[in-house]
Image (cartoon, grey):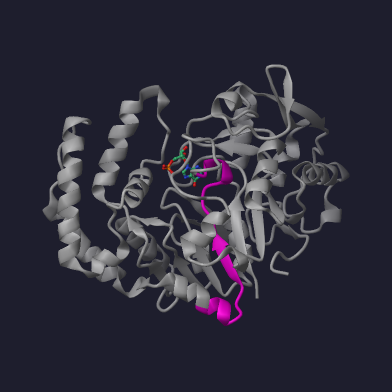
Amino acid sequence: MATLVVVGSQWGDEGKGKIVDILTEDAGLVARYQGGHNAGHTVVIEESEFVLHLIPSGILHAQKQCLIGNGVVIDPAALIEEVDDIEKRNLDLKGRFYISRNAHLIMPYHLALEKGSENSLGDGKIGTTGRGIGPAYTDKMARMGLRVGDLLHPDLFEQKLRANLQHYNTVIRALYHQEPLRAEPILQAFVRHTERMRPWIADTSLLVHNAMIRGEHILCEGAQGTLLDIDHGTYPFVTSSSATAGGACTGLGFGPGRVDHVLGVVKAYTTRVGSGPFPSEVQGALDEKFRSIGKEFGASTGRPRRCGWFDAVVVRYAARVNGLNSAALTKLDVLDTFDPIPICTGYRHKGTLLSDFPTDLSILEECEPVYEEAPGWTTSTIGLTEFDALPQRAQDYVRRLEDLIQTPFSLISTGPARTQTIRVCDPYR
Ligand code: IMP
């Protein structure tokens, strides 16, 4: 048995959904450890497209157990909508889907607070997904949060809700000039949510532990990406959770010694949504070309993603902070018509060459990318399943990326479908 942690190695949207879906085939349990419905995993199965925001995409495999750990923040309405959608497709969740009692809830006032805060930041806004993620984690750290387990104690839930509303309505009114929220409609909605969620609520750390004892492969699914991590990302232009591999331990409740393999998902070029520095970003026609071929629009918000060349400095950094054992390269086929293909190998900052990612945002903002050029292969790689079948120049590009990021690729994706994958080696072994 092995415990595998899958993380995004850039700014999110690396194509984790498909990689997780493939790795789910051999997993006994798939567990999500951070973030909320700000994530969006698109999975294509037999021509149908599924977009999941909260529930691990493993749920699309009929028999798999899936859970949402304590490190995730849950908007009950969003969760229930997602469950409804899955059940409409004749997939039964009974006895195989759980949410942690200790996961925090996203409450209606979190949405109002986030909207107010983003508006007040003007040009300096984070560009969040507007789902209340940041304020929910703020409450968690301030020890003011409402947790899934509180739903099972209605009196206590009401008491905490009223106390929080009293506090936040002052902020909402005075700072953000919005209408205060009333407790009654929120309480009524949460009574309905609780009835629906009750069978899913569990001690998920224990479920993970028991799956380990049974000798199952466990797949821990990260959302967002390393550069959006609250500690290791481009702060403050980050999400509010630990998207890096360490987050799997705290977000699910097991020790680091249990992790057997960390797999980083790496897109063959780079994208980012929201604000913040992005050294290898391209503009104009190239940006449009990436976006149209790579379908680079946010799965959660539909926002166009900013696009750029592969940045080896970023991924080398991700390899370090996550301790990557291997990587999965995605969307290689998107580069089929690009020629040449620049690769960012370092940064220049005021005349000095940097090969390590600067953690000081003000330095990062002033960095110029240093490129080397790989020749394009200008032929289709879509759907190839053998490394040797790739055109020589595509093989050289992949090998060069491995050298630069000091990490071998265990999987290479050549299209959105499960079958369009080169399986170099099995990360569970
Ligand atoms: P939040 O997570 O909604 O607070 O947004 C914070 C930042 O993370 C923004 O720049 C978002 O665009 C970005 N972000 C959040 N979730 C994702 C994701 O799943 N993929 C890519 N970017 C994301």
Please name the residue shown 37% across and 49% down the image.
Answer: 137
Horizontally, is 2 left or right of 352 in the view? Answer: left
Segment tinted magenta in the rendering: 210-229
Residue 221 located left or right of residue 387: left
Q: Is residue 209 above or below residue 171?
A: below
Residue 56 horizontal/vertical position (percent)? 49, 62
Residue shown at 49%/60% (left/top)? 250
Quarter of the image for residue 389 reads bottom right
Q: Position of residue 322 (x, y in %)?
A: 63, 51
Q: Nearer the viewer, residue 409 or 153?
A: 153
Q: Quadrant of the C terminus?
A: bottom right
Give the number of callouts.
0
Is residue 44 a member of the stretch shown in magenta? Answer: no
Left or right, residue 127 beside residue 214: left
- Residue 96: quarter of image: bottom left
Pick the quarter of the image with the N terminus: bottom right
Give coordinates of residue 164: x percent, y percent.
20, 49
Q: Where is 181 relative to 189, above or below?
A: above
Direction top: furthest residue = 350
Report whether 72 appears left or right of 176.
Answer: right
Residue positioned 15% across, 58% down in the render: 159
- Look at the image and say whether residue 227 sits in the magenta stretch: yes
Residue 91 visible in rendering: no
**As drawn, which residue projects farthest toward the bottom?**
214
Whole-percent x, y for residue 32 in the image: 49, 61
Q: Is residue 33 something that shows in the picture?
A: yes
